[in-house]
Amino acid sequence: MKRATSKLVGLLVLSLLLVMFSNVITVKAEAATIIVPDDYSTIQAAINNAAEGDTVFVRNGVYQVDIESLIVINKTVSLIGEDPENTVILGVFGIPSSSSTVAIRVAAPNVTISGFTIRNCLTAISIANYYDEPFPSGCRIINNNIVNNSEGIRPQRSNVLISGNNITENQGGITGWNTENVDVTENNITNNYYGINTGQSRNVTVCRNNISGNTGGLNLIYYGPYAVYGNTITKNDWGIRFAEGCHNATVCGNNITQNDVGVVLLNFPNSGDVVVSGVGNKVFGNLFVDNSEQVTQDELDYNIPGTWSMGTDIVLWDNGTMGNYWDDYAGLDENGDEIGDTPYVIDENNQDNCPSMYPVDISVIPEFPKWIILPLLATMILVILIYRKNMKLSGQMGGSKVNSSFFSGDNSRGS
Ligand SMILES: [Ca+2]
C-alpha cells in the first residue's frame, strides 16, 4: 500500500517536473535535420516532408513569400536560419499591385523560429491555428530580425516566448490578440509605430527589453494582468500608455527616460462598448528622467460622449513604501528618510506618495516569477506535504521507517 502511494507520488512529482521543463526536454528521438535548399528548394516543402520534432535548417539566401507561397508550420519543428542577417524571408508588402498576408503562420505546439530576417510582410509571424489544426502552445520566436512589416509578431495563442529579436520599423512590433502567458524578454524594439500593443491579452510579461524610438512604446489595453519590469524605455513619443480597460498592470524597475511623454493615461468617453476604465494598475520603483513630460492625461474626443469611461485614468504611483524617482520633484526631505516629505502630484487623481529623493537602483528590483511556475510550485508543495503526512501515518501504523525522514532530514525518529 505504502509502496504504491510512494510510486504514485513519485509519478506525480515526475510529471510535474516534465510539465515545468517541457520546453527544455522536448523529446527529440531520431529527430532529423532537413536542409533548405539542399534537400528541398522551399521552406514549405521541407516542412511538409519533416517529421514531428525535426529541424528545418535554412541556408543563407533570400526566400520570397507572397500570397501563393506563405509558410504554414503545422507540425512541431524547429525552423532555424543559418544567420539572422543573411537568411531573409522577404514579403511583397508595400509593392503596388501585390498582396501578402502572413509570412509564417504557426499552427502547431512547441515550434521554434530562430535566425531569420523577416521583412516587408503584412504580418511576419502569426501564431494562430484553425479549428482542425493543433493548438500552438509553447512556441518560441528567438533571435530574429523583424523589419518593416505591417505587423511583426502576432501571438494569438498561449505560452509564447519572444526573446532576443530585433523588432524595428514595423507598424506594430508585437501585437497580441486573444493571447495569454506571453514572455517578451530582451528584445530590441525600436522605431516602430507601436512597439508592443496588447489586446485581449492576459498574463503578459515584458522584461529587460530596449524599447526606443517608437511613436508609442508599450500600449497597454484590456485585459491584463501585465508585468513590465527592467526595461529601458527611451526616446519614444510616449513610453507607456495605459489605454482602454488595462487591468492589473505592474510597471516596476524600468528606466523611463528621454521620451516626449513618459506615461500617458488615455481616457475617453465611450459610446457603446462595455469596456470600463482600467483598474489595479501600479507604477513604482521606476526612474523618470529627462522626459519632456513625465505623465500626461489624454482625452480623445472622437467618441460620442456616453456613460462609460473607456480608458485608464487612475494609476497607483507607489506601493505604500516605494514610489518612483522623478527628476523634476521639487519637494524636500527634512526627516532624511530619502523619501520626499510631500507627494509628487500628477493630477487631481494621481500622485506618488513616496517619491524617491535619489535615483532608485533598478538593477535590484526582484524579478517577477513566471506566471506558470507559481501554481506548479504550489501543487508540488502540496504533493510533498501529502507525501510526508502519508509517511508519518504509515510510520505510526508500524510500517518500516525506510525513507520516512526523507524530507525532514531527521534520521533519529524510529517507529
Ligand atoms: Ca522624507
Image (spheres, grey):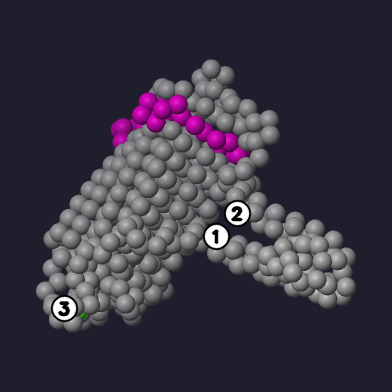
At mark 1, the secondary structure is: loop
Label 3 residue near ligand 1, CB within 8 Å: yes
What distance separates the C-alpha of mark 2 from that of mark 3? 47 Å
Task: Name which residue type carries label 1.
Answer: Ile
**Residue 78 image-quadrant placement:** top right
Give coordinates of residue 35: x percent, y percent: 54, 22
Q: Earlier in the sequence, mark 2 or mark 1?
A: 2
Task: Name which residue type carries label 2.
Answer: Met
Q: Are marks 2 and 3 in contact (CB under 8 Å)?
A: no
Ligand 1 located in image quadrant: bottom left
Q: Earlier in the sequence, mark 2 or mark 3?
A: 2
Q: Which mark is residue 20?
A: 2
Is 213 or 119 nearer to us in this picture?
213
Q: Which residue is mark 3?
A: 333
**In this orientation, does residue 363 appear?**
yes
In the rendered view, tell whether residue 303 sits above or below residue 28. below
Give the magenta-colored segment's residue range.
Answer: 73-97
In the rendered view, tell whether residue 305 sits above or below residue 213. below
In the rendered view, tell whether residue 140 sits above or below residue 267. above
Foreground label between 1 and 3:
3
Q: Are marks 2 and 1 in contact (CB under 8 Å)?
A: yes
Give coordinates of residue 64: x percent, y percent: 42, 27
